[in-house]
Image (cartoon, rainbow, N blue to C red):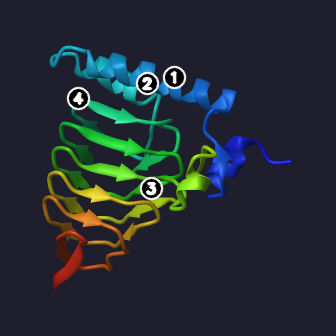
Amino acid sequence: MKSEKEKMLAGEYYNASDEQLTNERIYARNLTFEFNNTRPIENQKRLEIIKKLIAAKGAFHIEAPFNCDYGYNIEVGENFYANYGCIILDVNKVKIGDNVLLAPNVQIYTAAHPIDPLERLTGKEYAKPVIIGNNVWIGGGAIICPGVKIGDNVTIGAGSVVTKNIPDNAVAAGNPCKVIRNI
């Protein structure tokens, strides 16, 4: 029988109030609290804290405040930068490529809930992974929804709500986000 965590990572319905998952979220929240309450000059301390949360393949920088659900589901490539107010609900995998820039208040969601209200009242949740390619810039206030894949060499306009995949070499914007031109 699968654990609730295994169900969560498989994209199946799971119980978020599971004790293991609750403890892992509390651990991440304690680390993000510590990270977000460091002094701006304490860059080394911030880096040590954030490395306990996310997997990075190279140099990266995240501005405070930053929030996530678990942290261990986030993987960032070389030269990643997240500006102020980044939120990553990493209930499932979030894989971010090299040379990715997130403007202020970018939100990445993997978590989802049933559309049927009666089913939603049961407390069921599920999640879909988010993949962001290399050389991507995501504008301020953009929201990346569960299950979305953003290709390489993409620019997402500020305030966009990305509900569907965006192909390589595109500029996309809007709500819902659509390709407005190819690069």
Q: CA distance from mark 1 to mark 3?
A: 22 Å
SS at mark 1?
helix
**Mark sitting on residue 26:** 1
Crowd tier of the residue under label 2, counting other residues whose Cα lies within 10 Å: few below 14, some 14–19, many 20 or above: some
Front one among 22 and 68: 22
Q: Say whether marks 1 and 4 touch (CB < 8 Å).
A: no
Residue 85: % across, % down: 22, 37
Q: Give, as a three-letter code, the residue at label 4.
A: Ala
Q: Is residue 1 left or right of residue 120?
A: right
Q: CA distance from mark 1 to mark 4?
A: 18 Å
Q: Say whether marks 1 and 2 touch (CB < 8 Å).
A: yes
Q: Say whether marks 2 and 4 touch (CB < 8 Å).
A: no
Residue at left 25%, top 15%?
38
Front one among 136 and 15: 15
Crowd tier of the residue under label 1, counting other residues whose Cα lies within 10 Å: few below 14, some 14–19, many 20 or above: some
In front: label 1 or label 3: 1
Q: CA distance from mark 4 to mark 3?
A: 20 Å
Work out which residue is located at the far bottom of the displayed protein and give it: 182
Residue at left 20%, top 44%?
105
**Mark sitting on residue 95:** 3
Q: Give, as a three-letter code, the residue at label 2.
A: Arg
Crowd tier of the residue under label 3, counting other residues whose Cα lies within 10 Å: few below 14, some 14–19, many 20 or above: some
Please give the residue where the numbered disc 4 appears in the rendered image.
64
Q: Earlier in the sequence, mark 4 or mark 3?
A: 4
Residue at left 46%, top 32%?
53
Please give the residue where the numbered disc 2 appears in the rendered image.
29
Q: Earlier in the sequence, mark 2 or mark 4?
A: 2
Q: Tell me which corner region of the image, top left, top right, bottom left or bottom right, holds residue 167.
A: bottom left
Q: Say whether marks 2 and 3 touch (CB < 8 Å).
A: no
Residue 16: % across, % down: 60, 38
Work out which residue is located at the far right of the displayed protein and give it: 1
Q: Give, as a three-letter code, the residue at label 1.
A: Ile
